[in-house]
Image (tube, rainbow, N blue to C red):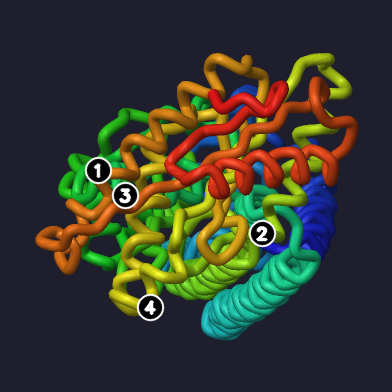
Amino acid sequence: MKIRKSIKQNYILFKVVTFVLLIIANINNYHRWSYMKIIPLTLFIVIFNILFSLKNKNLKIKVLGNFFLIPILLWYLNGVNNISYHVFFPFIILTATIYISRSYGIVLFALSNIFYISFSANNLNFMDKYLFFLYITLAAVLFGRFVMLHNMKSEELDKKVKEFEALYKISKLIDSFPDNQVVLEGIAEIVAKTLCIDDCLIMLYDKDRDILSTKAHYGSIYVNPRDIIFSMGEGAAGKVLKTLDSIVSSDLISDYNIKETFKYDFPIQACAIIPLIFNKKGIGVIAVCSKEKYKFCENTVELLYMIASRICSVLENSNLYNRMKINSFTDGLTKLYNYRCFYKTLKEKVENVNELNNNLFLLLIDIDKFKKFNDIYGHIVGDKVLITISKIIKDNIRESDIAFRYGGEEFAIIIPNSDLTSACKIAERIKEKIKGAKNYIDELKAEDVKITVSIGISSYPYCAKGIMNLIKEADIRMYWGKKNGGDTVVYMENTEVV
C-alpha cells in the first residue's frame, strides 16, 4: 500500500519533532555521558539506517533494529529513568502501524510495555508512570490504525477517480471515431498509465488462421510485442481465450501453475489477462503486466472487465461499419463490387494513369439473350447463372484487376497497366469459361442450353479521352458484338472483330 503524500509530509514533521525532543530531554546530562559507548553506538545506528535506506531493504528489519538500538542509546544517555522512552516508543509504534501493519504495531506495543516494566518496576511512582506510558503507547497504536484506515480509504477513492477518468477517456476516444488501430493503441496507453503498470497488450484472435496476436501495445517490457503469437489454448493468453476465464497473479514467481503457461520468459512479477468476449465467444484478450509484486487487486480486475467490454464494443462497431461500407459498394447477389463503386474506382484508376503515364483497359460484358433465358427457366435459375458467371470472372482475372456487376446482366472489369494482347486474352478466357457455366447449375445440366456473352473492350488513353467516353466506347463495341451474333470479344479498329 502506498502512503499518501500529505501523510508522508506530516510524518516527516512528526519525526523531526520527536528527535528534537529526544535531544532536548538528554542534552542537559551531557557531562555524565559515557562517550566511549555512546559515540560508537550512535555511529552504528546512523550507518544502519543509511544502509537500509540506500538499499531499500525490508522496512520491518529497519524498524525492529531501531526499536532495540535506540532505547539502548537512551539508556546510556540518561539511565533507566529517561523520560525519552515516553517519546520514542510511541513514535516507533506509530511508525510500524502506519508503514507496516496494525499487527506489527501491536507486537511493538507489547514489547515496549514489557521493556518498560522490566526497566522501571522498582522505581518510585512506577504505577503512575506506567499508566501514562501504557496510555500513550496504546494511543499510538490506535492513532496509527486510524491514519492507516484513512490512507486506505483515500487510496481507494483515488483509484476510483482514476478508473472513472480512464473510462471517460476511453469513451471520449471511442466517440471521436478514429481509425480502429488508433482506438486500440489509445486504450492500451490509458490502461497502462491508469494502473501504473509496465505493459499493456491487446491481442485479437484470427479464427481462420488460429492465431492470437498483438494488435495494440503500450509499455517497456516487450521489445517486439508483434512477435508474440499464440494459438487457441496455447500459453496463458491462449488458455484465457479458450476457457474465457481470466488469469490474475500478483506473485507470478510463486504461482508455478500460471508461470508454466507463459510461452516467453520475461521479467514479470505480476500479471492479469482478461478475455474479450462477444456473443459468448472469445475474440481476444487484454493483458497487463508489472515488474512489481502484488500489483493487481479485485478492483483492477473489475476495471479491466469494464474496459474489455468497451474494446468489444469498439471492435463490433468497427466490424458493423466495415460491413455497411462493404455492402454499400457490393452487389448483394454476386458479391462483386456494384455500379456505384465502379464509377468511383474507374475515376481513381484514370487519375492514376494520368499521374503515372501508363494505361488501362475496360471490359464490358453482357449475357446474350438473357431476357429470353429468364422467361424460359425463371429468375431463380437466372440468379444462379449470374452468380456462376461472377465466380468465373473473379477466378480468371489478375490480382490487380477489379470486377463489377455493372447492371442487370452486365459486368465490367477494369484492367490497369496492361496491353491489348493481355486484355484480349483475359476476355477470351472468360468468354470460353462461361460457355461451361451450365455445368455448375443443377437445373441446367441436362438442358440443351447455351450460355454465352459478348465483351466490348476500350482503353484509356488510346481510344478514349475521358471516363464517360471510355465507357461509351466499350458499350458500343459490346453491342456491336451482340448484333453480330454474340459470343464474341470486340476491340473495334476499323470495325473488325478480334
Residue type at mark 4 is Asp
Q: Amino acid at mark 1?
A: Ser
Determine which residue is flagged by label 2: 339
Indicate which disc, 1 or 4, sits on the residue closer to the N terminus.
1
Secondary structure at numbered mark 2: helix
Label at residue 237: 3
Residue tagged 4? 375
Q: In the rendered structure, which disc, 3 or 1, sits on the residue that comes first in sequence?
A: 1
User: Which label lies toward us, 3 or 4?
Assistant: 4
x 84%, y 48%: residue: 28
In the image, is 203 to the left or to the right of 401? left
In this view, the mark in front (3 or 1): 1
Residue pointed to by mark 1: 231
Choose the circle earlier in sequence order: 2 or 4.
Answer: 2
Disc nearest the viewer among 1 and 4: 4
Q: Quadrant of the N terminus?
A: bottom right
**Pointer 3 with pointer 4, Cβ within 8 A:** no
Tag 3's secondary structure? helix
2 and 3 marks in contact (CB < 8 Å): no
